Image: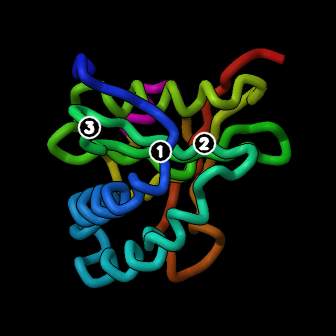
Amino acid sequence: MTPDRLIIRDAVAADLPAVRSLLVETWHATYDGIYGWRRVAEITNAWHSLENLSAQLDRDGEAFLVALVDDDVVATSSARRERDRAALLTRLYVLPAYQGVGIGRTLLQVTLAHFPLAPVARLEVELQNEPAIAFYERMGFFLQRSARFDGRDDTPNTLLMAKRLFAE
């Protein structure tokens, strides 16, 4: 059940400190047991810096959303249109205290609605992140293949998942 007070909207510059804090908290909660605290801190400092997040605002063909409950940012997502018109979900994180109440499902639906002509949605998920894999499977995604993120050896092992959005 999604909280009655849930608002989903485009992220703005004023949201970025809260988004960064959310990403740091959720990454540590999710990945410390897989990669260790130090590596997770390195990744979040590199990938989720205010500068990097700011560069993601207002890009054509992309969605960068926040979910708020009582004016607090409790979740964030981002996605972009690929060359083949697919929607690539690049981020979907919900604060641990707000997981399991439908916010992730609703945020995913709103994010994908930004790509009405996309025939398919794709995403990458860490191989050992079993709760996320189970969530995406419940949302209709299926396994395509295993890979290394961006093909690099120093990044997480991932599963590539996809979901058909409409019949062409």
Q: Nearer the viewer, residue 86 or 131?
A: 86
Q: Earlier in the sequence, mark 3 or mark 2?
A: 2
Looking at the rendering, which quadrant does residue 119 occupy? top right
Label 2 Cα neighbours within 10 Å, binned few <14 / some 14-19 / many ≥20: many
38 is within the stretch colored magenta: no
Q: Reply above or below: 144 against 19.
A: above
Disc 2 marks which amino acid? Answer: Ala
Q: Earlier in the sequence, mark 1 or mark 3?
A: 3
Quarter of the image with the C terminus in it: top right
Give the residue type at disc 1.
Ser
Label 1 to label 3, Cα distance in Å?
A: 17 Å
Residues drawn in magenta: 134-141
Crowding near pointer 1: few (<14 within 10 Å), some, many (20+)? many
Q: Residue furthest left?
A: 97
Tell me if label 2 and label 1 are in contact, CB under 8 Å: yes
Where residue 115 sits: x, y (%)?
A: 69, 30
Residue reaching furthest front? 14
Q: Label 3 vs label 2: CA separation?
A: 20 Å
- SS class, disc 3: loop
Residue at 64% across, 35% down: 121
For label 1, the residue is 77
**Residue 93 location in percent, x, y?**
37, 47
